[in-house]
Image (cartoon, rainbow, N blue to C red):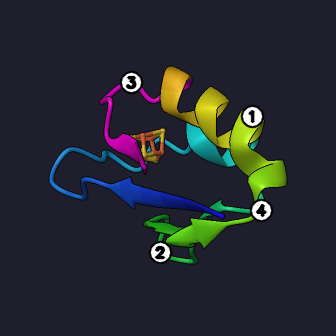
């Protein structure tokens, strides 16, 4: 299990993370980011990719 945190003060809701890890991140109907705080280990590569592409460096994988 991996734990995910997004700093919503930094997040600008651009949605790049949604393309990399659509099982974890989504934009809601108001175009605001929503995400699951935990995800299966099988999502690790996707969440790492999302972390890498986030222009605001807002995503953290919590150990
Ligand atoms: S890529 Fe980063 S800034 Fe964009 S929605 Fe995801 S967490 Fe927010």
* Vertical relation: 33 (above or below) 7: below
What residue appears at the point 32 percent right and 29 percent down from the top-left corner? Answer: 57
| Ligand 1: quadrant of the figure | top left
Please state which of the two labelled residues, at mark 2 or mark 3, is closer to the viewer.
3
Is the residue marked 3 within 8 Å of ligand 1, measured from its CB?
yes
Q: Which residues are magenta?
A: 53-63
Q: At numbered mark 3, what does the secondary structure look like: helix, strand or loop?
A: loop
Q: Which mark is residue 23?
A: 4
Does the residue at mark 3 contact the one at mark 4 (Cβ under 8 Å)? no
What residue appears at the point 47 percent right and 58 percent down from the top-left corner? Answer: 4
Mark nearer the N terminus (2 vs 4): 4
**Residue 2 placement, left or right of 37:** right
Mark nearer the N terminus (3 vs 4): 4
Q: Measure how far apart labels 3 and 4 are at the Cα level.
A: 20 Å
Q: Measure how far apart labels 2 and 3 are at the Cα level.
A: 20 Å
Residue 32: percent from the left, percent from the top? 43, 66
Which residue lies under the disc numbered 2? 30
Is the residue marked 2 within 8 Å of ligand 1, measured from its CB?
no
Which residue lies under the disc numbered 3? 55
Q: At numbered mark 4, what does the secondary structure look like: helix, strand or loop?
A: loop
Label 1: how many Cα within 10 Å (few below 14, some 14–19, many 20+): few
Q: Measure how far apart labels 4 and 1 are at the Cα level.
A: 12 Å
Residue ranking furthest to the bottom: 29
* Vertical relation: 60 (above or below) 53: below
What residue appears at the point 47 percent right and 74 percent down from the top-left corner? Answer: 30
Please state which of the two labelled residues, at mark 1 or mark 3, is closer to the viewer.
1
């Amino acid at each position: 299990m991996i734990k995910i945190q997004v700093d919503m003060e930094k997040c600008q809701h651009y949605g790049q993370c949604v393309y990399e890890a659509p099982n974890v991140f989504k934009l809601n109907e108001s175009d605001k980011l929503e995400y699951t705080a935990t995800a299966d280990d099988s999502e690790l590569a996707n969440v790492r990719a999302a972390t890498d592409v986030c222009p605001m460096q807002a995503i953290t994988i919590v150990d």
